[in-house]
Every structure is written in C-alpha cells, then in structure tokens.
C-alpha cells in the first residue's frame, strides 16, 4: 500500500485573511506532502508495515517512521479542524461539556492559546476528550507527538510549528493562535469527534 495525501477540505485561499493562500500552499504541498513521501520512502522495503493502517503504524513505530506517520495524521486532522466560514459553533452537548470543564468557551480558548504559545519548540495544541475521567482537556505535544497514542480522543488541533504561521505572523505565534480561535475553528468537526467519543 502507498499512503496518499488526503485532499485539502477547502481552497488554498479559503482561510484568508487569517491564514494566507501562500502559507496553505507551502504547508500543504511542501510540508504535509513531504511527510507522505518520506513515509512511503521509509516503508518501501518494509513488507511488514507497508500494508498497515496509518493509525497502526503510529501506535507501533518509533523514530523516523513514527515521526512521518504521525505528522501525516496530525496534518490531515489540522486541516479538518479549520473552517473558512466561521459559521460553526459547539453543539449543545459539546458546549455543555465545555462549560462543565472550563467554565465557558473563552476560558477554553485561553487554555488552547496558553498550550500552543507555551509549547517551547515545534508542536501542536489539542482539545481532547478523556474517556476514563469523562472530561475535556487541553494539552500540547512536541514535534510529531500525538494524543492518538494515548486513551484520549482528539477533537481539534492547532499546528504551532513555525511553518504554520511564520509567513503571515512572523514570530507572533500567539496572534496566529488567537486568530484561528476567534475566526476559523471548525466546530462541526469537533462536534462530530465528540459525538463519536
Ligand atoms: Mn505543519
């Protein structure tokens, strides 16, 4: 099996002015696509893992193969977490849980902002569902690390690698995260992930 690059769920300029078409173009066609290519190269002679699912590879690999596979999965999840329309909002079920676990949506946004801005180097900010304690939580992961390797169910993510924002916001990672939180989070995607969890 050869892993393929999932199509972008929107046009490259659909996230303007919050994320430029130039950033989406580089991010998708160079970075995301590059991880798919590297993963296929790494598994070209690996009969055992070549036919596994992306999720299986993430949960059973480490090093270079893990990094490539997890970055493919994280990026596909990131694109789905964004919505050009700013027309979605948390479902009544998710809103209730947000109020329960954070107080209100603004407090959740602040938690995501702090997690993303506080990640020292490259990484990701996540809203997740913890099924054992039955609560939402916010976390960040470093480099290619992903909540997929834990019990938690990710609901949405924000890529905080510099390539995600440097062309548009230069070094102001906080402004990039806030802009996404206030304008282009795809709550329908989070709602669907929450409903499945
Ligand atoms: Mn990225």
Image (cartoon, rainbow, N blue to C red):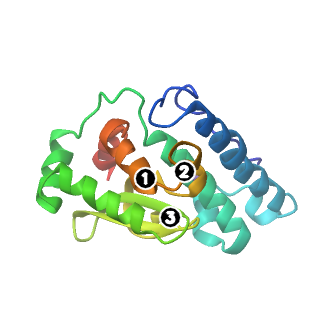
Residue depicted at x 30% and y 49%:
194
| Residue 102 vertical position relative to residue 164 in the rendered view, above or below | below
In percent of width and height, residue 100 lies at: 11, 58
Nearer to the camera, 84 or 134: 84
Residue depicted at x 37% and y 26%:
85
| Residue 139 vertical position relative to residue 44 in the rendered view, above or below | below
1 or 2: tag closer to the N-terminus:
1
Question: In this figure, which residue is indicated by the disc labeled 3?
Answer: 146
Distance from Cα at disc 3 to Cα at disc 2: 25 Å
Q: Secondary structure at mark 3?
A: loop
Q: Nearer the viewer, mark 3 or mark 1?
A: 1
Residue 82 shows up from this direction:
yes
Distance from Cα at disc 3 to Cα at disc 1: 10 Å
Residue 128 shows up from this direction:
no
On the image, which quarter does residue 119 sit in?
bottom left
In percent of width and height, residue 95 lies at: 17, 46
In percent of width and height, residue 122 lies at: 55, 65
Question: In this figure, which residue is indicated by the disc labeled 1?
Answer: 157
Label 3 within 8 A of ligand 1 by Cβ:
no
Residue depicted at x 57% and y 67%:
143
Label 1 within 8 A of ligand 1 by Cβ:
no
Q: Nearer the viewer, mark 1 or mark 2?
A: 2
Callout count: 3
In percent of width and height, residue 31 lies at: 68, 49
Question: In this figure, which residue is indicated by the disc labeled 2?
Answer: 170
Nearer to the camera, 132 or 96: 96
Tell me whether the residue at label 3 lies in contact with that at label 2, contact meaning CB atoms closer than 8 angstroms: no
Q: Secondary structure at mark 1?
A: strand
* Badge 1: residue crowd in 10 Å (few <14, some 14–19, many ≥20): many
Tell me the tag on residue 98: none
Distance from Cα at disc 1 to Cα at disc 2: 20 Å
């Amino acid at each position: 099996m050869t892993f393929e690059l999932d199509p972008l769920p929107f046009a490259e300029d659909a996230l303007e002015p919050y994320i430029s078409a130039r950033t989406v173009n580089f991010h998708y066609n160079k970075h995301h696509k590059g991880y798919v290519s590297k993963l296929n190269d790494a598994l070209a002679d690996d009969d055992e893992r070549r036919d596994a699912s992306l999720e299986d590879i993430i949960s059973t690999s480490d090093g270079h193969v893990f990094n490539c596979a997890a970055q493919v999965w994280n990026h596909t999840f990131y694109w789905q977490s964004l919505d050009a329309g700013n027309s979605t909002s948390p479902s009544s079920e998710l809103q209730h849980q947000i109020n329960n676990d954070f107080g209100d949506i603004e407090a959740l946004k602040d938690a995501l902002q702090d997690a993303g801005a506080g990640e020292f180097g490259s990484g990701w900010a996540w809203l997740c569902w913890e099924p054992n304690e039955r609560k939402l939580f916010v976390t960040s992961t470093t480099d290619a690390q992903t909540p997929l390797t834990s019990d938690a169910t990710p609901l949405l993510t924000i890529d905080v690698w510099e390539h995600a924002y440097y062309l548009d916001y230069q070094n102001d990672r906080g402004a990039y995260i806030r802009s996404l939180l206030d304008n282009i989070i795809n709550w329908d995607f989070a709602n669907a992930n929450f409903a499945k969890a």
